[in-house]
Amino acid sequence: MTPSEAALWFLNTRVRIVVPAASGADGLSVIRHWAPYGDSPPLHVHDTEDEVFHVLEGRVLFSVDGALQEVTAGQTLMAPKGVPHSYVVESPEGAKWLTVTRPGDFEALVRETSRPASGPGLPPAGHPTPEMKAHLAEVCARHGIRLVGAPLTPRQPAE
């Protein structure tokens, strides 16, 4: 991990930018995520970058272009740019994964919408207001990401 990159609370997740896009010539970005059971972003499309997910712990259900795929620790999945995708954390203990993108648009979104983590764990659970959803859509659009649908829900309730 890059010591200079402090933990951030990004929506309902804890993230750490382990390889900032600015650290190399090609803009490669690696972000470590920790998310609770049921966490899911809206269905969205990245217009400028592929998104690679490598699950470190837990079980995550992905939807990529309408196809569902369960990904567990040690497995990797790619959501190509231009393709609608989302995920939902299905393991009761939450999940941890790495996200790899280039040229750093997703990282810029994370930086703009996050706040410094004020504790060692996940942020307090919350539900976005209509104003928060509208603001997220605006910020996403500035970074080449379009929100195109609702978040996913877990297939089974937490155990």
Image (tube, rainbow, N blue to C red):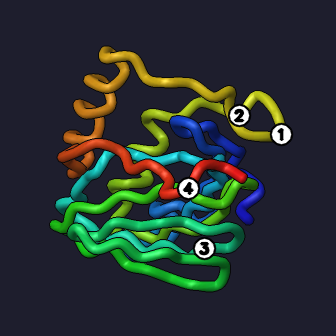
Secondary element type, mark 1: loop
* 3 or 4: tag closer to the N-terminus: 3
Pinpoint residue 5: horizontal percent, then vertical percent. 68, 51
- Mark 4 crowdedness (10 Å alpha carbons): few <14, some 14-19, many ≥20: few
SS under mark 2: loop
Q: SS class of the residue under badge 3? A: strand
Q: CB atoms at circles 4 and 1 under 8 Å apart?
A: no
Q: Are marks 1 and 3 in contact (CB under 8 Å)?
A: no
Up/down of 156 relative to 7, above or below: below
Residue 55, label in figure: 3
Q: Position of residue 140 (x, y in %)?
A: 28, 41
Q: Residue at x 29, y 62 (%)?
A: 85
Q: Is residue 18 left or right of residue 4?
A: left
Q: Which residue is mark 2?
A: 117
- The amino acid at mark 2 is Ala
Q: Nearer the viewer, mark 4 or mark 1?
A: 4
Q: Is residue 2 visible?
A: yes
Disc 4/disc 2 C-alpha distance (Å): 30 Å
Where 52 falls versus 123 (above or below)? Answer: below
Q: CA distance from mark 2 to mark 3?
A: 22 Å
State yes or no: discs 1 and 2 in contact (Cβ < 8 Å): yes
Question: SS at mark 4?
Answer: loop
Q: Give the residue at x 74% y 65%.
A: 1
Three-letter amino acid code at the position of disc 3: Val
The residue positioned farthest toward the right in the image shown: 120
Residue placed under numbered mark 4 in the picture: 156
First-in-chain label (1 vs 3): 3
Discs 3, 4 touching: Cβ within 8 Å: no
| Amino acid type assigned to the residue bearing label 4 in the image | Gln
Q: Which mark is residue 120?
A: 1
- How many other residues sit within 10 Å of disc 1, few (<14), some (14-19) or many (≥20)? few
